[in-house]
Amino acid sequence: MMPFANLIRSEIADLEAYTPILPLDVLAARLGLPIEQLVKLDANENPYGPSPRTVQALADLATKAGPTGQLAMAIYPDPNQTRLRAALSSYVGQPEERILAGAGADELIDLVLRLFIAPGDGVIDCPPTFGMYKFDTGVNGGRLIPVPRRADFSLDIPAIEAAARSGAKVLFLTNPNNPTGNLTPLEDIEHLLKLPLIVVVDEAYIEFASQHGAASVCDWVPRYENLVVLRTFSKWAGLAGMRVGYGIFPEWMIAQLWKIKQPYNISLGAETAAIAALEDREYLLGNVARIVAERERLLACLRNLPFLEPHASASNFILCRVTRGNARELKLMLERLGILVRYYHTPLLQDYIRVSVGTPAQTDTLIHALETW
Ligand SMILES: *Cc1c(COP(=O)(O)O)cnc(C)c1O
């Protein structure tokens, strides 16, 4: 046999394999529990799901006519994302010319890195944080420069500045941060925007943060030529399964992104679901308010447990340090009961679990289970 594996790009061959999560039906079968009984608090999905308007729009799409007797779904979707970008423009208050949608914010993280990162170029992230920055940096052959957060999970600004001077091209900031739930003060973001690199502010959870007085930096994009803001429908709009995110970009950058975007990255189903969600934003923001209220109740319940140290959160999840016993065992104990929480196999987070905010009934189930630990 020819050693065809030698033909693989060396950056990819050297990457660690990504461990995907188990599909829910497989996990349910393995646990011997019916799937409806699982309490899924491990991926920050919305417990109230999508808007009824989205459900109806998708049902209508199943039979919607396209040209000459075909169904609409038989035809390629709009590569310019015209209707979706118009709807997004009214939601974020920025012109369509600055907006581009992706198959999840995840696709846009990759797209930004593809635009800037050649093998060996530096990318800064601030762990503990969202794992896709590291993942996509690896896929693009970039060199990840992790600048760990301080003990209170705030950014280490001098260390970021030092890393930026070492020649990094892109900096990822998550606001509020996942999995720690804290906000970065706007003054810090403003300060970091003076660095000679691209600053990507990932606002995947910003809709859950307004009660903390947090403001989006969307409307700063016209002022800073190096600012990118990423958003998603996965969390606040209950559409994680449909894969729709978007970004607000400087005009010089978006012109280049259009050149490298996959033409049909937003499927007709995703476009339809997202537009209907934006038309029903009052309803969805009502659910966000319920989740925020439940977050505060969950925090109070978790604080009553002597072996957990939960961190206040401006998001839809709560990070907890396990102060007695082993965090991984706690996660496995909950899993045997059908309650799924997030555990990280990383040194920075080995003593932590992250719990997504669910419905009040899910909180009660979780707390009862924890009380038996
Ligand atoms: C969930 C999440 C995303 C991913 O969003 P998708 O639109 O589902 O790809 C992006 N950033 C952060 C910080 C997240 O937690």
Image (cartoon, rainbow, N blue to C red):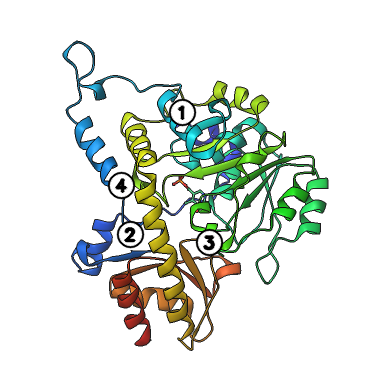
Residue behind mark 2: 47
The percent position of residue 230, horizontal first and vertical second, equals 55, 42
Q: Are marks 2 and 4 in contact (CB under 8 Å)?
A: no
Mark 4 to mark 1 CA distance (whole Å): 19 Å
Secondary structure category for the residue under label 1: helix
Is 298 rendered above or below residue 82?
A: below
Chain-order first, disc 3 or disc 1: 1
Residue at image location 42% in from the left, 60% down from the top: 289
| Amino acid type, callout 2 | Pro
**Disc 3: which residue:** 211
Amino acid carrying mark 3 in the image? Gln
In the image, residue 162 above or below residue 280: below
Mark 1 neighbour class, 10 Å CA radius: few under 14, some 14 to 19, many 20 or more: some
If you read the primary sequence from the N terminus, does the residue marked by circle 2 or circle 1 appear first? 2
The residue under the point 33% across, 20% down is 76
* Circle 2 residues within 10 Å: few <14, some 14–19, many ≥20: some
Give the label on residue 320, or none: none
Q: Distance between the residues labelled 4 and 3?
A: 22 Å
Task: Name the amino acid type tagged 1.
Answer: Ala
Q: Name the residue under label 4.
A: 51
Identify the image quadrant of the N terminus. top left
Q: In which quarter of the image is residue 25?
A: bottom left
The answer to which of marks 4 and 1 sits earlier in the sequence is 4
